[in-house]
Image (spheres, rainbow, N blue to C red):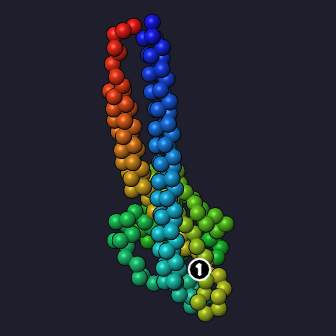
Amino acid sequence: MFQPIRTRLLVSSLVVFALVLGGFAGVVRLVFWRNLQQQLIDRLTTLGQTAAASVEYQGGQMRVEDDLSIADLQRQGQALQWFDRQGSLIEQQGERVLNQPLNPQMTIQAQGHKPAIQAVTLPIFNSDTGDQIGYVRVSQSLDQLDETLGQLDWGLSVGVLVERRGHSLADPPGDGAN
């Protein structure tokens, strides 16, 4: 007589437990993703500031110093692009560049299709006059970020499944008095 009620309560509690764990895993993933995204933007901004400082302005022309290692950029899936004030490409280093035109109003841009890329655009100022002379755009492949999120997803999924399995095994078997 009590077996159907017990079964419904067990199923209901397992569903609620699964929803709570799934919600928790979703929130953890979202917070982790936003943290990784902000760290990436901070790294790209720092690299962009370094790249902007490597520009010299002589005779009305921007000249890019080769202070940055192209091998380091390629190893990390990064690229640099320097533009004049009109948005014309002056120089590029690295391979994984954003395939979108320069838009100075958008400091942060992303390319969702393959290859997925995050980019930060910063203005370049003349160190002598303080006038803006161009832009630098720093791009990075999102492959490593996607791999890290994949590992997190795998770990959260295994954790939820193990916890659900452990929860259903911990339930006492029926006492047969029904």
Question: Residue shown at 44%/59% (left/top)?
Answer: 141
Give the quarter of the figure containing the N terminus: top left
Assign a secondary structure to mark 1: strand
Residue 91 drawn at (x, y percent): 50, 74
In this picture, is 77 found above or below 51? Answer: above
**Amino acid type at mark 1:** Ile
Residue ranking furthest to the bottom: 128
The residue beneath circle 1 is: 124
Residue 137 drawn at (x, y percent): 54, 69
Q: Nearer the viewer, residue 87 or 114?
A: 114
Question: Residue shown at 57%/69% (left/top)?
Answer: 121
Residue 68 drawn at (x, y percent): 40, 78
Give the quarter of the figure containing the C terminus: top left
Asked where in the image residue 2 lies, by quadrant, the reply is: top left
Question: Residue shown at 48%/14% (left/top)?
Answer: 5
- The answer to whether any part of residue 165 appears in the image is no
Residue 93 drawn at (x, y percent): 44, 71
Question: Residue shown at 52%/71% (left/top)?
Answer: 45
In this picture, is 160 found above or below 7? Answer: below
Label 1 crowd bin: few (<14), some (14–19), many (20+), radius 10 Å: many
- The answer to whether any part of residue 33 appears in the image is yes
Q: How many marks?
A: 1
